[in-house]
């Protein structure tokens, strides 16, 4: 993915600034730590993020942020805990841009699905609204474009494991097919 993607956001900034869920993690090696494609990682490093803050993933292409201890939690190395801001916000990875959606496998790993993480208080309260339902369509339309499918299928660590806190809203047909082909 060479092109910089800027997806529309549904959660208002003021809601996020009064919430302390994103960018903080309970374990040092949380699988939820953000995944960067090579291009996204290079962009982040070019803006000053330390290259040592990334580790390779098992897909051989993407990289995952190494979390930093902060109090009794662990934070993304791109997070400024003093201001609660992402220091690379305009170039943050797709993995972060789609939240509170999660790309993941269904429970028996036969499909790639899109879900809404109920850990996000906005997602939990707004998911049934018309605006949120339209946003689901918007996100699915983007994730099923050829370029998004190609990127995610190549950086398949972007597809996380099934999570019980995530409510599945759609099956992503093209990504499911792409993953099946890659495994063959
Ligand atoms: S969990 Fe939801 S409301 Fe909270 S910071 Fe993240 S996106 Fe914003
Ligand atoms: S890259 Fe930015 S938005 Fe993503 S987890 Fe790190 S600080 Fe948060």
Image (spheres, helix red, strand yellow):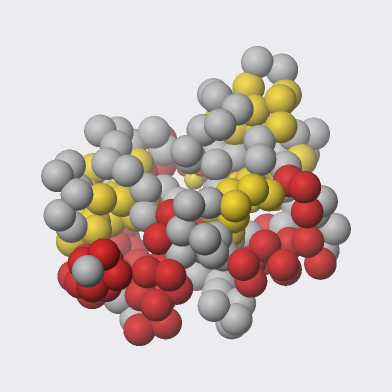
Which residue is depicted at the point 24% across and 58% down?
112
Identify the residue at image location x=26%, y=64%: 183
- The location of residue 62, given as percent across then percent down, is 55, 60
Is 76 placed left or right of 46 in the picture? left
Q: Quadrant of residue 85?
A: top right
- The residue drawn where x is 64% and y is 28% is 74
Residue 92, percent from left and from top: 63, 60
Task: Quadrant for residue 148, please give it.
Answer: bottom left
Residue occupying the far right of the picture: 48
Q: Nearer the viewer, residue 156 or 118?
A: 156
Q: Quadrant of the C terminus?
A: bottom left
Q: Residue at x 35, y 75 (%)?
A: 149
Please provide percent x and percent y for residue 2.
60, 81
Q: Nearer the viewer, residue 181 or 148?
A: 181
Res 153 seen here: yes
Q: Which quadrant holds the N terminus?
A: bottom right
On the question of residue 175 being in view, the answer is: no
**Residue 103 found in image quarter:** bottom left
């Amino acid at each position: 993915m060479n092109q910089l993607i800027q997806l529309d956001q549904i959660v208002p900034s003021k809601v996020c600034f009064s919430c302390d869920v994103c960018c903080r993690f309970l374990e040092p090696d949380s699988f939820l730590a953000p995944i960067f494609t090579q291009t996204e990682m290079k962009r982040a490093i070019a803006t000053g993020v330390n290259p040592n803050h990334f580790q390779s993933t098992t897909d051989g292409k993407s990289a995952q942020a190494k979390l930093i201890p902060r109090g009794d939690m662990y934070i993304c190395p791109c997070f400024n805990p003093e201001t609660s801001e992402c220091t690379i916000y305009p170039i943050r990875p797709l993995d972060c841009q789609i939240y509170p959606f999660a790309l993941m496998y269904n429970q028996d790993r036969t499909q790639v699905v899109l879900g809404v993480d109920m850990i996000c208080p906005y997602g939990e309260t707004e998911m049934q609204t018309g605006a949120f339902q339209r946003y689901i369509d918007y996100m699915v339309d983007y994730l099923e474009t050829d370029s998004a499918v190609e990127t995610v299928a190549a950086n398949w660590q972007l597809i996380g494991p099934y999570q019980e806190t995530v409510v599945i809203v759609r099956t992503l047909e093209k990504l499911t097919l792409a993953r099946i082909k890659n495994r063959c």
